[in-house]
Image (cartoon, grey):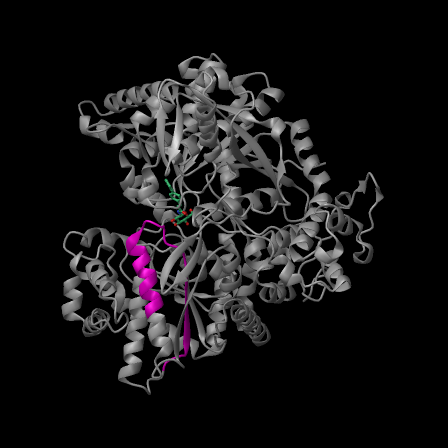
Amino acid sequence: MATEHAASHTRLPRHDAPDDLLPQYGCGPIKFDGGSNALFERHLLFDNVLAPSEIGNRERYEAIARSVRDILSQRWQQTEETYNRENPKRIYYLSMEFLIGRSLRNNVLNLGLDPLARRFFNETQLDELAILAEEPDAGLGNGGLGRLAACFLDSMATMQLPAMGYGLRYEYGIFKQTIVDGWQREQPDNWLRRPDPWEVARPHLAVAVELGCSFEVRGGNLKAIVGVPSTLLGIPYDRPVVGYGGKTINTLRLWASATPDSFDFQEFSAGEFVGALAERLAADTVTRVLYPDDSTSMGQGLRFVQEYFLVASSLADLVRRFRANNSDWNDLPDKVAIQLNDTHPSLAVAELMRILLDKGNLAWEESWEITRRTLAYTNHTLLPEALEKWPLRWFELLLPRHLEIILEIDRRLREELLARWPDDNDRAERASIVERGGARLVRMAHLAIAGSHSVNGVAEIHSRLLRDVTVRDLAELYPDRFNNKTNGVTPRRWLLLSNPDLAGCINEAIGDRWVTDMERLETLRPLAEDGGFVSSVRQAKRAAKLRFADWLKSQAGISVDPDTIFDSQVKRIHEYKRQLLNGLRIVALYRRLRENPHLDIEPRTFFFAGKAAPAYHVAKVIIKFLNNLGDTINGDPATRDRLRLVFLPDYCVSVAERLIPASDVSNQISTAGYEASGTSNMKFMMNGALTIGTRDGATIEMAAAAGEENFFLFGLTAEQVATSRGWYSPWWHYENEPETRAVLDLIMSGHFCRHEPMIGETLRNILLAGGDPYMHLADLASYMEADMRLQSLYSEPDAWTRRAILNIAGSGKFSSDRTIAEYASDIWNLEPCLVR
Ligand code: 26Q
């Protein structure tokens, strides 16, 4: 059943570009037939002032991207004009991270320009893949939290919501990872070395950010110059966020820091020109680099200034916009919703209070009411070491007025706690904002909870643990604020764009409306019994595997066999995510094969990818171990035809877009209770991989949606993890489970790390001597058992594909459109605003 739109040969849904996307330009009408593509030719010739012989694919990429930007620019501007005219309530999404990836193909797709692009490449005979590969990934994020922000922007624009993202324009994104001798090495990601065709600098909209002192930056640490207040300039750089269908084009506004031009060198340094220049350098340093997600960088002063810089620039900007269209501060919560992506922008509580008190001259109670009704906070982690706390001393130096405000918020909160639970000083101490005892710290999560009307976690189990365990005292004080918003991912990038084969086969079966209404995938459920559909889904998976294998061969020179099971675990390397548990499983299978060469097991290729925070030593040893393990089993004649392990370097959005569609198996094996949600789990599911995993994060809800019988669940539950903490000992498993013992003995014998005893020693410490805090050994036997079930299902191709279809059919809930619809109705009270 093909739809009327499924005409083009890739069978992608084809919506026509809105008429006014094809505007008239000052130079006369532009023809959009690929043959005389005037826009492209003009950019190619004039933007870089090069002779035709000097033009390469990078210049071609820039010219195409600039042409696409030309095409969308009027619609983009009309979107903002409409919002200004209609003055709807707007949502501002504040995030230190937006993990965007590449934009060209995504923008072309969302604008409905796919047919045009196809014609263009046909006629010009240019190398499409090589040109697309010239675009660097915009890696302005660490992982899940940053990618979630990018998916949310896509959904908000697609749903025609008046939304804007605010973030930082890091000159260096997440580091590039190389693997040298099995070890991770970090290289700077200078993604802006060449001009970025998507961004529009708006220096005339610069804002000033005032700090209580001046500072120099030494190795990420701040050296305060006390008593000399300073000013930073925030320069906005706007990027278009194209909604699917091209109707709404929202803005992602990224701030770059600079020193004000009006800076008074004389007064500051009394003729000290060099000293004044040093100050200028410090200001320019603020948005230089994205901090990697790890607990060692938690205490760095530059990060603190970055967070305030984001908050102050964004609030100044949105308040200016609000004031231009409204006269009464009390209308702010009816016109503005601000969502805080984790505590990273939670200084917004104090900043908004400061604006209302000092600029609006409002009373405390009124200001507090407006602040709370405007702000909402999303929590993404329960790990205590990841909860932000900043030294009070830094507030004294850099943000003295904010400190006054925070101390008053803290005083009132303590008063409220003691009024509600008289004499319970312990509770007041636990729940307060300022942590006393030793150096005083400001608990940013408590500040965010106190100053928001909504506090949400990102999956059911996570929201429950947040409320009942992590911040229980505050949840008892403000029960109505706490809610859940299970994460989602955009089906445009993660299915339609990255998996054309599967998308085409779904379109043929049920039409293309699932692209903006993922619940429609439910209608695939009966087709799990349709032989024709089952075989076309299997073919689509095979095509994706072949495409990935070709790419891997050409990129890295690595050959993989598409007839093996592609079994993947891709995510940041962290102990709680338990890449090591996966490693133990592989060692166990390797041992079984060596013991019994005739063992009937499904040939398999294991894929790992992910970065370790540069200062996270244990995570780096895990990467080293996995690489060594790969070297051993890939080189062992007894196993190399049936087990292979590939560690893909430099995991990023673009690698995910290729690997996920090609995977048969998705590993989601965190210690239950630790993964807030996970989002790659959802991408695998909608691409027809089967999940082997623990009952953690959103995986629990995914299994419920697909039917638990279509999942390979194993391991302790979060409750079991919590209650066995006190008495758990990995030694019990070592002593009582022969395979567990044999696996560990083999690792500790140095079999995989012959001349590197330190590796085995570290693993022994993690898994045995150190008490195995993430309980790898507790779950190994049950992981192996689930793995056996998985293998036996794979040996029946039709049964396997049927389950894959039931997974795809159940994945509709995990569209970020559903998540955003819930935020809009439950938290933001926000309606769409149609552009003309
Ligand atoms: C904090 C302070 C200083 C330096 C860095 C940081 C920092 C940066 C990034 C702390 C945490 C992060 C990122 C966290 C993250 O990605 N969390 C993931 O969020 C996803 C989206 O909700 C969830 O699906 C994952 O479960 C969660 O781990």
x and y, in percent, of residue 304 in the image: 38, 33
Q: Residue furthest right?
A: 28
Can you say which quadrant of the picture contains the C terminus?
Answer: top right
Quarter of the image for residue 404 reads top left
In the rendered image, residue 14 lying in the magenta stretch gets the answer no
**Residue at x 30%, y 26% (from the top left corner):** 392
x and y, in percent, of residue 123 in the image: 78, 63
x and y, in percent, of residue 704 in the image: 41, 58
Q: Specify start and end residues of the magenta stretch as a single range.
A: 601-628
**Residue at x 45%, y 58% (from the top left corner):** 650
**In this image, 384 relative to 736: left or right?**
right
Can you say which quadrant of the picture contains the N terminus?
Answer: bottom right
Quarter of the image for residue 550 reads bottom right
Q: Is residue 328 above or below residue 20?
A: above
* 688 vs 589, nearest the viewer: 589
Quarter of the image for residue 649 reads bottom left
Q: Residue furthest bottom?
A: 598
* 381 vs 182, nearest the viewer: 182
**In this image, 150 relative to 737: left or right?**
right
**Residue at x 43%, y 76% (from the top left corner):** 794
* 243 vs 32, nearest the viewer: 32
Q: Is residue 592 above or below residue 392?
A: below
x and y, in percent, of residue 798 in the image: 49, 77
**Residue at x 28%, y 71% (from the top left corner):** 752
Would residue 78 be seen by someone viewing this image from the given angle? Answer: yes
- Quadrant holding ligand 1? top left
Q: Is residue 355 above or below residue 525?
A: above
In the rendered image, residue 609 lying in the magenta stretch gets the answer yes
Would residue 785 be seen by someone viewing this image from the given angle? Answer: no
